[in-house]
Amino acid sequence: MKKIFIFLFLILVIVNFSQIGIKKENILLKKNSDSWIVDQIIDEFESKLSYSYNVYKYNKKNILNLNYDVEIDFTEDSSKNNIRILATFDGTRIDLTEKIKNNKDWIKIFSTKVLEKISFKRLKYSKNWNFLQLTFWDGIDEYPMISPDKNKIIFISDRYIGNRNVWGYNLIENKYINIPLNFSSEYFPNITEDGSYVFQSSLYGKWDVLIYNPENEEVKRISDDSYNAYTPYYYKGNIYFSAEERNGESWTEIYKYNIKENKIDKITSLKNTFKFRPTLWKNKIIFQMINPRSGQNDICTIENHNIKTIISSDLNEVDPFGFGNYIIYSKPKDGYYRITLYDTENNKENPLTINISDDAFYPSAYDNIILFSLYYKNGEPDIFAIRLSK
C-alpha cells in the first residue's frame, strides 16, 4: 500500500509541475556497500530529496531501466574510515568523499553539504534543469541573492548555531561562505563587487543596515543610530534601504547611500505609509508600499519626485524585484503565496509556482534564473531556483 501511495503522489506532483513548465527530475541512489552507515546515509538523502526529485534506489537485485538526471554512488571504505560519494550529472562526475565522524549529527550535516554542493554545481554550469532545490538544511534558508559577477550565491541561514547569519557558497572555489556574527540576526544579504557584504542586522540592539568587510572583519553602520532601518538592496556602489521616521506617528521612507561618497539621500517623502524592499528596475527605484489603515500592499516607483503605483490589486503583492521587462514578486493565490512574474510590456501575470502547494517568498533574479525561498517543511524554508525559457 505504501509503495502505491508514493507512486501516485509522484504522478500528481509531476502533473502539477508540468502545467507551469516545472518538472521533478529523476535521481538514482546507488548502494555499493552493505553497511549500516551507507544505509543511514542513503535514507537521509532520500528524505531530503523526496520533495524536489523522483528518487530511485539501485542495487544488484533492483535494476530500473530509466533515464536519470543525477546519479549518486555510495561506497564505504572501512580501511580509511571514508564514505565515498560519486555524483554524476550532465556528463560531469564529482567526488565528494569524506571521513566518517563519530557524532550523532554527522550524517545530517554530511548529507546536507553533499546535496548542496551538487546543486550549486548544477546552478553554475548546467543548462539541463528548470526546477532546482539548492539548499537542504533542516532549519531556515531564505533571502537568496547572487553576486554581481554571478560567482557567489548568498542567503540567510540558522544552520549550526540557531541565529540567522549570512551564509553562501562560492560557485568557483566550491566552498561555503559565512559571516560569524553569532550574537545577532541578519536579513536581506547583498554582496558588492569588492566582496563586502551588505545586510540588515540586529547587532547594535535595533535593526540597522551594515556593511561588513571580510578582509579585516570591519563592520560599518550606515543607518541612523536612533531609528530602525530595513531591507537593503545593493547595486553598483549604492545601497537602497528603508528607514523609520517618527513624528507622533511612525512610518518609513526609502533612502540611498553612496558608498564612495559616504553620502545618504532621501528618496521618498510620504507620511503614514510603510515602504520596504527597494530595488532597481530599468534605472527606476521600485518598492513595496503599505497603507497601514487599509492593509493594502502596492508596488510603486518614483517619477518626478512623486510616488507612482505600478502594480496594485486586492491580493497584496510583496517582495518586488525587477529584471529586464519583468517584475517578480510574491502574491497570494488559491491559499498560498506564489512567485509571480509580471510582464510589464504586455501587462500579464504568470504565477510560476501556482501548482506548488506551499508558500514562496523573497524572489531575486539574474539572467533567466529566479531564486526564491519555499516554505515547505513544516514552514521552514529552503532556497529553490526556476529557469525561465528564453
Image: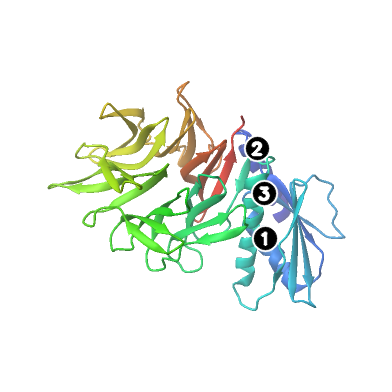
* Tag of residue 15: 2
| Residue 153 position within the rendered picture, expressed as x and y whole percent measured from the top left | 54, 51
The N terminus, quarter of image: bottom right
Q: Say which amino acid is labelled 2.
A: Val
Distance in Å between CA atoms under marks 1 and 3 = 11 Å
Is label 3 in a helix, a strand or a loop? strand
The residue sitting at 84% across, 47% down in the picture is 65
| Residue 94 position within the rendered picture, expressed as x and y whole percent measured from the top left | 73, 56
Q: Nearer the viewer, mark 2 or mark 3?
A: 3
Q: Say which amino acid is labelled 1.
A: Phe
The residue sitting at 69% across, 74% down in the picture is 100
Q: Quadrant of residue 109?
A: bottom right
Is label 1 in a helix, a strand or a loop? helix
* Tag of residue 45: 1
| Residue 309 position within the rendered picture, expressed as x and y whole percent measured from the top left | 32, 28
67 above or below 28? above
Q: Earlier in the sequence, mark 2 or mark 3?
A: 2
Callout 3: 10 Å neighbours few (<14), some, many (20+)?
many
Q: Quadrant of residue 207?
A: bottom left
Visible residue check, residue 270: yes
* Tag of residue 152: none
Is label 2 in a helix, a strand or a loop? helix
The residue sitting at 79% across, 67% down in the picture is 75
Q: Earlier in the sequence, mark 1 or mark 2?
A: 2
Q: Nearer the viewer, mark 1 or mark 2?
A: 1
Quickly name the residue at label 3. Answer: 53
The residue sitting at 23% across, 54% down in the picture is 227
